[in-house]
Amino acid sequence: MRGCDDKLKLLMQSFLTPRSFPTLLCIAMSFAFRSSLRLAAIRSQFLPSIIPLQRPFSFSPIRTMSVPTNMKAVVVEQTGGPEVLQYKTSWPVPTPQEGQLLVRNNISGVNYIDTYFRTGLYASPKPEILGREGAGTVVALGPNTSGFKVGDRVAWLGTSGYAEYTAAPAAKAVKIPEGVSDEDVMASFLSGLTVLSLAKETYAVQKGDWVLVHAAAGGAGFLMTQVLKNIGAKVIGTAGGPEKCALVKSLGADVVIDYRSEEGKDWVKLVKEATGGRGVDVVYDSVGKDTWEGSLEAVKRKGTIVWFGNASGPVPPISLPTLSPKCVKIARPTLFGYIETREEFEYYTNELFSLLQSGQLKVKIHKVYPLEDIIQVHKDLEGRKTTGKPLLKP
């Protein structure tokens, strides 16, 4: 046996020479090719239909969820009182256009400005769906709309918030951070951004400034009082009734005046007494017609008055010489003038969310009303029966 092995080894050594390598390679390749053909023939008997190789899947962002054709909404077809607010159960769902997000609203804010569009104080085309803000889930994207995806939880500013769905501008929408509820955002979004811009830009409040805030228990006043105290200002707040005054006092206001009380009717005198006869550095007045003259009296020499609302009616035309004796500065700003660019919008929304997350800004929700109760919401708002922010559940 050993002799056979030695003969086989000798044969292999004589055959495996460098000159024989090309021949061996050709033999091996030929054998492999013929074997592959035999395997393919055998395979075809068992798998007669071979599935062709598919191209790799190309994944693209989902741009829409299932959306109904109709929705519930509140529509105003003509100007007037709360009775012109029509609750509809089969209104067409809007189609998002370029630069828009279709948002399924979880909660919507109600603001005093909504009554201005309803009554015609502010002109707007009719029919229209009122509501300037909402919070909910993105369910579709309009063409060429980036920065968001379906499923994002967002807050938005725009129009048509009194509805289940809103085609909101992506430029004025922002993702809501984790840990902040939709309700807390809506209790502070439009009002909070307004308050921050007024306190930082319209008049840059400084530590130690005396500030008069009218309607300090309202949606904006409640937030304004807290923002001013965080800055270190000395705050005088006006409100109507003991309950509202107690609320304002709990926010840290230095002086609270009940303008419904007998003493509070002469609120200008009380402001002067609180400031040592000097007057306040700035007045933030969202009431308008009923308070504008007193605000001019209560402000100090070289002081500033900021009118940003018309709860009792608009401020009438003012003769410029009226401002001369005390060299008073006046302003009538609007929020959208301060958040026109995306950079400005994100600056203030980030500031607001930071205050909410840190607990430095607390919200107060008057009540969450069902959408069908919209007439009562406006009656409560205009009747000064609300404390904090009224919200709608579409």
Image (tube, rainbow, N blue to C red):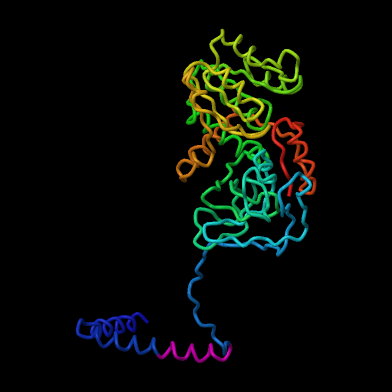
User: Is 5 placed left or right of 387 in the picture?
Assistant: left
Residue 363 x/y as whole percent: 66, 31
State the predominant SS element of the stretch in magenta: helix
Asked which quadrant contains residue 318, the reply is top right
Residue 299 x/y as whole percent: 55, 18
Residue 195 x/y as whole percent: 57, 32
User: Is 5 placed left or right of 224 in the picture?
Assistant: left
Range of the magenta residues?
34-46
Question: Which residue: 46% across, 20% down?
Answer: 327
Residue 245 x/y as whole percent: 71, 20
- The residue nearer to you, when weighing 259 against 211, is 259
- Asked if residue 381 is positioned above or below residue 371 in the image, the reply reads above
Question: Which residue: 75% across, 56% down?
Answer: 72
- Asked if residue 124 is positioned above or below residue 383 in the image, the reply reads below
- Asked if residue 376 is positioned above or below residue 289 in the image, the reply reads below
Asked which quadrant contains residue 375, the reply is top right
